[in-house]
Image (tube, rainbow, N blue to C red):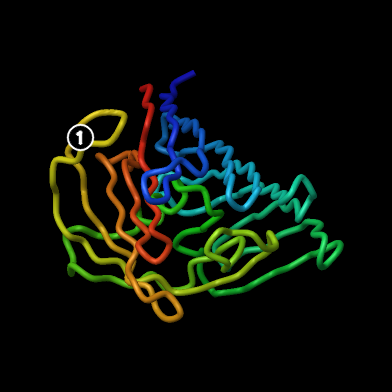
């Protein structure tokens, strides 16, 4: 088999104290398609999330599975599929029961957000660094529009404005790396931007800062 594997662990921090963690494994196939598997624990919200998400060679979404529980109780479990006209899902949620959704856009959604930190970073795959410093992705799809992804999971959509802020040397618990620095320019009710740092063409997540929650997310372990 012609594939490469990256594994890592991300610490969730609030005011320097660990409040959760995320383990991820990324498989990159010979044609450039990728799949990640992530397990997320949020101690302060008592939230557990399991996600398997695949993109094609151009990083556009293909399919995803999300299982979400809070306080050891199932919130929902849903399978998502994306095509050249939009997206669809089949699932079961505690609030809605059995769900079946279809959202047609007339094009494949540029990205999908299932709420692991690595998934936030993968939105950046659609940013053209040869273009303007600020660009908007239209009709990205999400499994939840809650900041912690604690609803659904079911199809939502939104627009996302991204600003590129250049490169810098960044030190995180996993080491010191040359990082690309971006920001998500969020709209009300979020009064502050979300800042993101990643490494290389494979978009290895290094750090996210979310000032509204005094929260940061930092790469603690990396195996390539």
What residue appears at the point 31 percent right and 31 percent down from the top-left corner? 173
The number of numbered discs placed on residues in the rendered structure image is 1
Q: On the picture, is 14 further left or further right than 124? A: right
Compared to residue 201, the image places residue 143 above or below, namely below
- Name above or below for residue 48 compared with residue 108: above
Q: Position of residue 18 (x, y in %)?
A: 46, 40
Residue underneath mark 1:
177
In terms of image quadrants, where is residue 128? Answer: bottom left
Residue at screen point 57% across, 68% down:
145
Q: Residue at x 75, y 51 (%)?
A: 77
* Image x and y of residue 6, in percent: 41, 27
Image quadrant where one finds the C terminus: top left
User: Residue 175: percent from the left, percent from the top?
Assistant: 25, 28
Toward the bottom, the furthest residue is: 188
Local packing at callout 1 (Cα closer than 10 Å; few below 14, some 14-19, many 20+) is: some
Q: Residue furthest right?
A: 97
Most extreme residue toward the top is: 1
Left or right of 145, for residue 167: left
- Please tell me which residue lies in front, 165 or 126: 165
Q: Nearer the viewer, residue 128 or 46?
A: 46
> How far from the left and from the top, in percent, is residue 45?
62, 53
Q: Secondary structure at mark 1?
A: strand
Which residue is nearer to you in this view: 92 or 221? Answer: 221
Q: Residue at x 50, y 44 (%)?
A: 19
């Amino acid at each position: 088999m012609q594939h490469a594997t990256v594994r890592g662990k991300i610490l969730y921090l609030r005011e320097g104290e660990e409040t959760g963690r995320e383990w991820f494994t990324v498989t990159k196939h010979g044609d450039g398609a990728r799949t990640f598997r992530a397990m997320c624990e949020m101690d302060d919200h008592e939230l557990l999330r399991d996600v398997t998400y695949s993109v094609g060679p151009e990083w556009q979404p293909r399919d995803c599975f999300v299982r979400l529980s809070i306080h050891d109780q199932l919130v929902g479990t849903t399978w998502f599929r994306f095509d050249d006209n939009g997206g669809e899902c089949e699932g079961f949620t505690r609030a809605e029961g059995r769900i079946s959704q279809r959202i047609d856009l007339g094009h494949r959604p540029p990205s999908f957000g299932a709420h692991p930190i690595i998934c936030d970073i993968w939105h950046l795959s659609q940013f053209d660094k040869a273009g303007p410093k600020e660009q908007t992705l239209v009709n990205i799809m999400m499994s939840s529009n809650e900041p912690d992804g604690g609803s659904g999971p079911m199809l939502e959509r939104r627009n996302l404005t991204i600003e590129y802020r250049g490169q810098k040397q960044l030190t995180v618990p996993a080491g010191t790396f040359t990082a690309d620095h971006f920001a998500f320019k969020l709209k009300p009710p979020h009064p502050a931007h979300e800042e993101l740092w990643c490494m290389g063409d494979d978009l290895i997540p290094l750090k996210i800062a979310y000032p509204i929650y005094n929260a940061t997310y930092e790469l603690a372990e990396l195996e390539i």
